[in-house]
Image (cartoon, grey):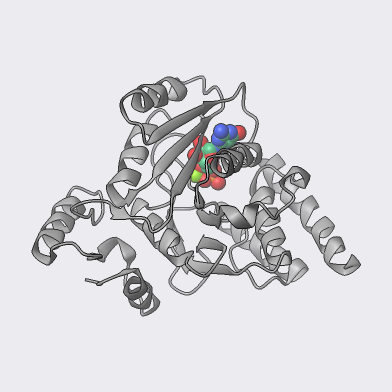
Amino acid sequence: MAKDFAEVEAMISIGINSARIVVLQEQNETAAIASAEKHVAEGRGPVPTRPHKSPWRTLVVIPTYNEKGNVKPIVQAVHNYLDCDVLIVDDGSPDGTGEIADRMAATDSRIQVMHREGKQGLGTAYLAGFAFAMKRDYERVCEMDADFSHAPWDLPRLVYASDEAQLVIGSRYVKGGCTVGWGFRRRMLSRGANLYTRMMLSSGIRDNTAGFRCFHTDALRKIDLEAVHAQGYAFQIEMAFRMRRKGFQVREVPIHFVDRRVGQSKMDGAIAREALMLVPRLRGRVKRG
Ligand SMILES: Nc1nc2c(ncn2[C@@H]2O[C@H](COP(=O)(O)OP(=O)(O)O)[C@@H](O)[C@H]2O)c(=O)[nH]1
Ligand SMILES: [Mg+2]
């Protein structure tokens, strides 16, 4: 049990799994433990008696492409843990994800849906989400996958950790972080991409391709978002790089990344190649000035 999110990070740093930590944050202790125990037994993690209150107006952007089995449960899970608004950016999923999202949004004012025509990539989905957040004066905007690879109980940790860091990354490659369920090839690809990026850019960031993040919208306003063209993992590398280059604080908090159980990955060779090509360009920028 932790009294607040600062204590959670201290517990995780000595090896405790966030899936087993009850964060009090002003809840009644007995009720909080009972709620966590009940929901852990159901496989939903340590759900609090009521969602944690974000200290800032927070929008969580969830891009979806063919996530009909995930979209409803992920949004519900997010709202179990954090008092926030959710924007689903759906690229005309042929499996009907967009219609499911619309039905949820119709009965819950905290849920918004943006429909785009055809699969346009993760990068532009997030850029559209950032623009939405800035326009509506959200103070924080989070990135999160729809497929439960990012644990919903880690979301409030990211938001609270953004106190003094303009970018918080849920990181697999700092002490206490890991991936669960990935095969050898996928592990090597991710490890290799991060090793390569770290060596080329020496920005000090350990997990450059992670897609579980919290940004200050004020900081995003100072980034030239129109110049960002990268799509897949390259988008994440580029955003982290640009934040660092502007002198913003980047903080990594360890997470366990769990491979999806429902639906299919959209990762492909083109996404990996894009990252391979982008990094030297970013490096060139460092050298020039
Ligand atoms: N809107 C939109 N979402 C996408 C696109 N590609 C992937 N996603 C979503 O981005 C998230 C991460 O994608 P995923 O395929 O799980 O990548 P992986 O975890 O790296 O294998 C999931 O929520 C996907 O549904 C896209 O082109 N457009
Ligand atoms: Mg995934």
- Viewer-side residue, 218 vs 142: 218
Q: Please say if 121 is above or below 243.
A: above
**Could one spot residue 265 in this view of the protein?**
no
Q: Please say if 1 is above or below 49.
A: below
- Percent coordinates x, y for residue 159 in the rendering: 43, 59
Q: Please say if 25 is above or below 106.
A: below
Q: Quadrant of residue 111?
A: top left
- Tell me if 1 is positioned left or right of 244 in this view: left
Q: Which of the image's four quarters has the C terminus?
A: bottom right
- Percent coordinates x, y for residue 136 in the rendering: 52, 40
Q: Please say if 7 is above or below 138.
A: below
Q: Residue at x 85, y 61 (%)?
A: 285
Q: Quadrant of residue 281?
A: bottom right
**Could one spot residue 237 in this view of the protein?**
yes
Q: Which of the image's four quarters has the N terminus?
A: bottom left
- Tell me if 32 is positioned left or right of 113 in this view: left
- Percent coordinates x, y for residue 270 in the rendering: 71, 40
Q: Residue at x 74, y 50 (%)?
A: 224
- Viewer-side residue, 241 vs 233: 241
> How many labels sit on residues?
0
Q: Residue at x 33, y 48 (%)?
A: 83
- Viewer-side residue, 269 vs 122: 122
- Tell me if 155 is positioned left or right of 271 in this view: left
User: From this viewpoint, which residue is outermost toward the right?
Assistant: 288
- Tell me if 222 is positioned left or right of 282 in this view: left
Q: Residue at x 33, y 51 (%)?
A: 82
- Percent coordinates x, y for residue 91 in the rendering: 56, 27
